[in-house]
Amino acid sequence: MSQVRIALTGAHGTGKTYIVTKVKERLEVEGLRVALIESPTRYVKSLGFTINQDSSYAAQLLSGTIRTERQLLAASREDIDVVLADRCLADELGYNIANVTRYHRKGNLKGLQHLHYADALLREFFAADIAGYWDEILFQPPHPDFPPEEDGDRPTEVDYWHEISGAIKQICEDFEITGRMPLDRDEGVDVLYDKVDYLVVKKGLSS
């Protein structure tokens, strides 16, 4: 079965969830069946793992594994036309890279070894995602005038926010992901909607 699959990626608090939710609403009004892939970070946190600064390689691998499972479940559903996600494996890679820098500063050599192991595995998983799952991945940059707000999940420190954004942007460059979203989230809704609409027509999913 043919589906349209698009993911956003970028630091927390950049409007990604808002954008995919609004696009889902617009597509459903038109009669399309849309699945949103929920980020596993809150679930991973509920299991006792640290998911932000100083998170472990195990937390990133678990998050990436659950994310991949949710993607595969969405792909298997014959009642779904469009799959949207406000994150992808580039996010786990980005947070992992930020922690590599932090562990270097602390001289945590054993922790670094584990993080490099996680990086290698996540890169392999992400390469498979790019080749066989997503139609497009789009990087959402942070808006300089709107720092992250408290959501009970990710921290609000601006320096860490920019560090994560830079790490994910580097991942996108490493994998030659060139799609970029605008800074304004409402403009982003229109951009993502247009991209989905184009692919829906191209794949013959429009009614």
Image: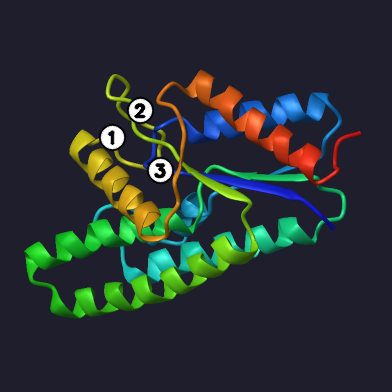
Q: Which residue is mark 3?
A: 10
Mark closer to the observer (2, 3): 3
Q: Which residue is mark 2?
A: 149
Total marks in image: 3
Q: Residue at x 54, y 42 (%)?
A: 86
205 left or right of 117?
Answer: right
Point out the image quarter for the C terminus.
top right
Dot 2 or dot 3: first in sequence order is 3
10 left or right of 70?
Answer: left
Mark closer to the observer (3, 1): 3
Say few, some or many: other residues with alpha carbon within 10 Å of mark 1 (under 14 / 14 to 19 / 20 or more): some
150 left or right of 42?
Answer: left
Point out the image quarter for the N terminus.
bottom right
Q: Which residue is mark 1?
A: 156
The reply to whether residue 106 is visible in this rendering is yes
Residue 166: % across, % down: 27, 46
Say few, some or many: other residues with alpha carbon within 10 Å of mark 3 (under 14 / 14 to 19 / 20 or more): many
Q: CA distance from mark 1 to mark 2?
A: 6 Å
Q: Residue at x 49, y 35 (%)?
A: 16
Callout 3 secondary element:
loop
Task: Verify CB contact (< 8 Å) between mark 3 and mark 1.
Answer: no
The reply to whether residue 51 is visible in this rendering is no
